[in-house]
Amino acid sequence: MPSFRVVSRDPSSRARRGLLPTAHGEIETPCFLPVGTRGAVKGVEFDRLEGWDCRAILSNTYHLMARPGREIIRRAGGLHAFLGWPRAILTDSGGFQVMSLSSRRRVTEEGVEFRSPEDGTRHFLTPELAVELQSEFGVDIAMTLDVCPPFPAERREVEEACRLSELWAERSRRSRPGAGDGGLLFGIVQGGTHEDLRRTAAARLVDLDFDGYAIGGVAVGEPKESIRAITTSTAPLLPEEKPRYLMGVGTPADLLASVRAGVDLFDCVLPTRNGRMGHAYTRAGEVTIKHERFKEDLSPLDPDCGCPVCRRHSRAYLRHLFVLGDFSAPMLLSLHNVFFYLEWMKRIRNAIAAGELARLTSPPEGKIE
């Protein structure tokens, strides 16, 4: 399979526009991947995502291993067939759950034992099993198993997370199936907010020659300034000829700043999570639709947006649905937000191609009250 190719560069920053071939289609970068942790992008049908030219989604190996389980995915013919999604899939390995399920897991040198929050069943995930599962699922981009330290954390805890992550990256690399399986394997740079640990971790991962590299362990509680500083300092440490992926980030402004730092791939739960809470992203800023001021506002959620929600519904109607508690309300805002993110990334790609990224401004952050 052809490798990642940069097709244009921004003259004012490290931003680049690229093409990442996968077994299920080419991904145009910079690219936002809607999050379907358990196999579904909440509130957004796959037909819509295809219609909006979404090239890839994200799912999670740990959650899929626990439920529905590898056997039914295998019997379905792989994860694409099980989900009914024909385009690219990236799967996180479960490293984030090492942090998020800290009260329900035990980390050893060998791997991580999880106790499922749903039914209490135990699952033991090793670096080798994480690679095996993702290969068996037939995903396009697989991630190595890592340890994601929380924020804040003592330096010695971050150092131990780096040590295990690097050890597990080596084991993942050795256990990788043959290149003929069509899947890509990415290594993950940890290091918390410590630039020296990030620099050391990046150098060791680059030596292992992964297909791509992720900046992990961000957006876990750090101030926004720290997230952007980590991204800006870490991205240049990763090979120019390989795709770079920033895990779990962020707002539209975060995405633009990170693209300018040289990042190519992104995922974040904000579009759907905030949509379910009544929070929408627009070109004019962030809207909390349940606010009283929108009770009689008959204008679209975002007059400049071409999504089906903005073409059909008013702010007053959307607020009405939330006040009623109608189940369509969070779905409609999730639809709008995912469309907005996908269109935002398209605007960024076009600006890079035209050499005009410096002129692109992100929507103001903060709610429109």
Image (spheres, rainbow, N blue to C red):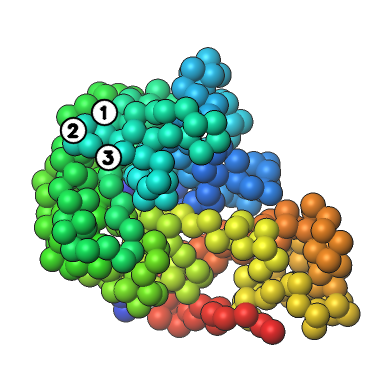
Looking at the image, is 180 positioned above or below residue 6?
above
Q: Label 2 vs label 1: CA separation?
A: 7 Å
- Tag 1, which secondary structure? helix
Question: 10 Å neighbourhood of mark 3: few (<14), some, or many (≥20)?
Answer: some
Query: Is 138 on the left or on the right of 303, as rendered?
Result: left
**Residue 110 place in picture, x, y as percent:** 21, 32
Q: Nearer the viewer, mark 3 or mark 1?
A: 3
The quarter of the rendered structure image containing the C terminus is bottom right
Q: Earlier in the sequence, mark 3 or mark 1?
A: 3
Question: 10 Å neighbourhood of mark 2: few (<14), some, or many (≥20)?
Answer: some
**Residue 206 place in picture, x, y as percent:** 15, 49
Looking at the image, is 127 positioned above or below residue 346?
above
Tag 2 residue = 171
Farthest residue toward the top?
A: 75
**Residue 313 place in picture, x, y as percent:** 83, 65
Looking at the rendering, which quadrant does residue 316 occupy?
Answer: bottom right
What is the three-letter code of the residue carrying label 2?
Arg
What is the three-letter code of the residue carrying label 3?
Val
Question: 10 Å neighbourhood of mark 1: few (<14), some, or many (≥20)?
Answer: many
Looking at the rendering, which quadrant does residue 176 occupy?
Answer: top left
Q: Nearer the viewer, mark 2 or mark 3?
A: 3
Tag 3 residue = 107
What is the three-letter code of the residue carrying label 1?
Glu
Q: Which mark is residue 128?
A: 1
Residue at position x 43%, y 77% in the image: 356
Q: Earlier in the sequence, mark 2 or mark 1?
A: 1
